[in-house]
Image: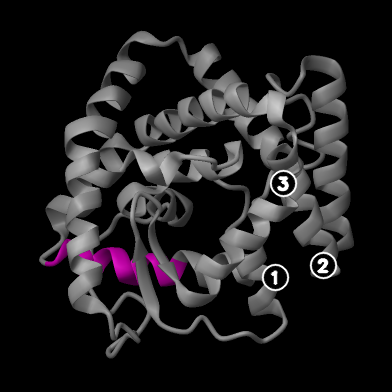
Amino acid sequence: MARWFSGLPGRQIAGACAVVLLLAGCAATGDGAPGQGDDNLLGYEEPNDPLEVPNRFVFAINDAFDTLILKPVAVTYDFWVPTGVKNSVRNFVRNLSSPVILANDVFQGEWERANDTAARFFVNTITSLGFFDIVDERHPYHDEDFGQTLAVYGVDDGFYLVLPVFGPSSARDAAGRGVDWLLDPLTYVEGARTLSIAASAAGGVDRRARNLELIRDIKSDSVDFYARARSLYYQRREAAIQNTDGPRRE
């Protein structure tokens, strides 16, 4: 899987480490309660999943990656790293993603949210290089990406797709990742890539550590973890598109 990490900007590495198997999706929904059926949390009786066979194969590889590598690292990190350091890691990674979030806020005409993003980025960068979040109460954090922007303009999500390392996605959201890569200023700063990738990878581990119990509960409650992941993915994306997901919980 090393080739999937080659050349990726910091924001994408954060997602790669955090979203293996739906990790970011589950964290965003904040809902680990089992439904009446693993594939019916949002009424998706017949999800658009024409690639289910290869999707399940990639999902199994991601699951193995999480079980053998990401989860053990996250457990160790959670046990040994002080809470203050964990918070600084999360804050720094969030700050790195701010330019992409801001661009998508503007594309969507969400001027109040754009103001929140710009204020957070400016103040946190100036005061602490992003390691401390001192404006959270006044300008709450939110996430935004180009997949959401496309949805706002009426682009359908297309078919369901499980990406290697990145996990659950859709045709629309996978294409959006490419645009976000182009929107990220760090993509064009050669000297900053190594530090950015290292910091973002640490952020991915941090996110996994914050959701150890949630992911465990979802897996144990699921008759079919793949179907449950698919349903939760759509649930999380719909909430994000409608801006009803609230401040991102990681």
- Mark 1: few, some, or many residues within 10 Å (few <14, many ≥20)? many
Front residue of 45/161: it is 161
The residue positioned farthest toward the bottom in the image shown: 46
Front residue of 233/10: it is 10
Task: Look at the image and say whether residue 71 sits in the magenta stretch.
Answer: no
- In the image, is 119 to the left or to the right of 39? right
Q: Position of residue 14 (x, y in %)?
A: 51, 38
User: Which structural element holds mark 2?
Assistant: helix
**Which of marks 3 and 1 precedes in the sequence?**
1
- Residue located at (30% from left, 54% from top): 32
Using the rendered image of the protein, determine whether residue 250 is visible from the camera's viewpoint. no
Q: Which amino acid type corresponds to the residue marked 3 in the rendered image?
A: Asp
Q: Main secondary structure of the magenta part?
A: helix
Using the rendered image of the protein, determine whether residue 79 is visible from the camera's viewpoint. yes
Q: Quadrant of the N terminus?
A: top left
Q: Position of residue 17 (x, y in %)?
A: 41, 39
Q: Position of residue 103 (x, y in %)?
A: 80, 56
Q: Nearer the viewer, mark 1 or mark 3?
A: 3
Q: Which residue is mark 1?
A: 149
Q: Are marks 2 and 1 in contact (CB under 8 Å)?
A: yes
Q: Are marks 1 and 3 in contact (CB under 8 Å)?
A: no
Task: Look at the image and say whether residue 230 sits in the magenta stretch.
Answer: yes
Instruction: Specify start and end residues of the magenta stretch as a single range.
Output: 224-235
Q: Which residue is mark 3?
A: 184
**162 shown above or below 96:** below
Front residue of 28/14: it is 14
In the drawing, what numbered circle is on residue 107?
Answer: 2
**Which of marks 2 and 3 precedes in the sequence?**
2
